[in-house]
Amino acid sequence: MKRRSSYEGLQEHIRGLKTPDIEVWKNQYPDREYTIHLEVPEFTCLCPKTGLPDFALIHIRYIPDKWCIELKSFKRYILFYRQLGIFHEHVVNRILEDFIKASRPRWAQVMGEFNIRGGIRTTVTCEYKRKEKKR
């Protein structure tokens, strides 16, 4: 007998959600491989079930190619999540998807370290590596 989750249907809209645009600026060193680390120490979103706030430290590491992330627009993007009910796993995956769409990095990793809730600390990490073009 398959059990029905009380969370079923709560997150079906996440992949199609319209988020604010993340702006970029032209990298003047695309010939050099270097890593940029962004840290968001005061990330907040809402629990999709209870509506209570969730707090996290978000780390983003990326190796830019032609574009770098513009930080003020990224801050506006992050603020969007404050009123959004979303699972921790979906936060991290969605940030990575939007990050890749905006900047097309060579490599990127997003890690969310969510504060303890119910005695459990959750850390979610996802990664992207651009596939090399066949020559």
Image (cartoon, rainbow, N blue to C red):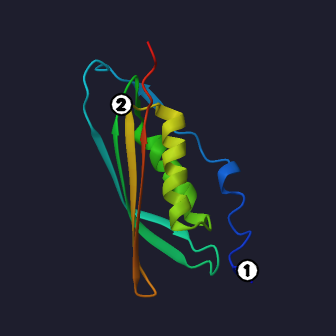
Tag 1: residue type? Lys
Q: Is residue 106 left or right of residue 1?
A: left
Q: Is residue 4 left or right of residue 68?
A: right
Report x, y in % for residue 84. 61, 64
Instruction: Tell me the mark number nearer the camera, choosing from 1 and 2.
Output: 1
Quarter-wise, where is residue 69 in the image?
Answer: top left
For marks 1 and 2, the one nearer the N-term is: 1
- CA gap, disc 1 to disc 2? 45 Å
Asked whether 20 or 122 is in front, the reply is 122
**Which residue is pictured at 48% across the width and 66% down the height?**
44
Mark carried by residue 22? none
Q: Is residue 127 above or below residue 124?
A: above
- Asked which secondary structure carries label 1, the reply is loop
Residue 23 visible at all: no
Asked whether 94 or 27 is in front, the reply is 94
Report x, y in % for residue 113. 37, 66
Q: Is residue 29 above or below residue 76?
A: above
Q: Is residue 4 above or below residue 95?
A: below
Tag 2: residue type? Pro
Residue 117 visible at all: yes
Residue bearing the label numbered 2: 64
Residue bearing the label numbered 1: 2
Q: Is residue 101 above or below residue 20?
A: above
**Which residue is pictured at 38% across the width and 47% down the height?**
109
- Asked which secondary structure carries label 2, the reply is loop
Q: Is residue 26 left or right of residue 17?
A: left
Report x, y in % for residue 77. 52, 48
**Which residue is pictured at 46% across the width and 44% down the height?**
74
Q: Is residue 34 left or right of residue 94?
A: left
Quarter-wise, where is residue 132 in the image?
Answer: top left
**Which residue is pictured at 72% across the width and 57% down the height?**
13
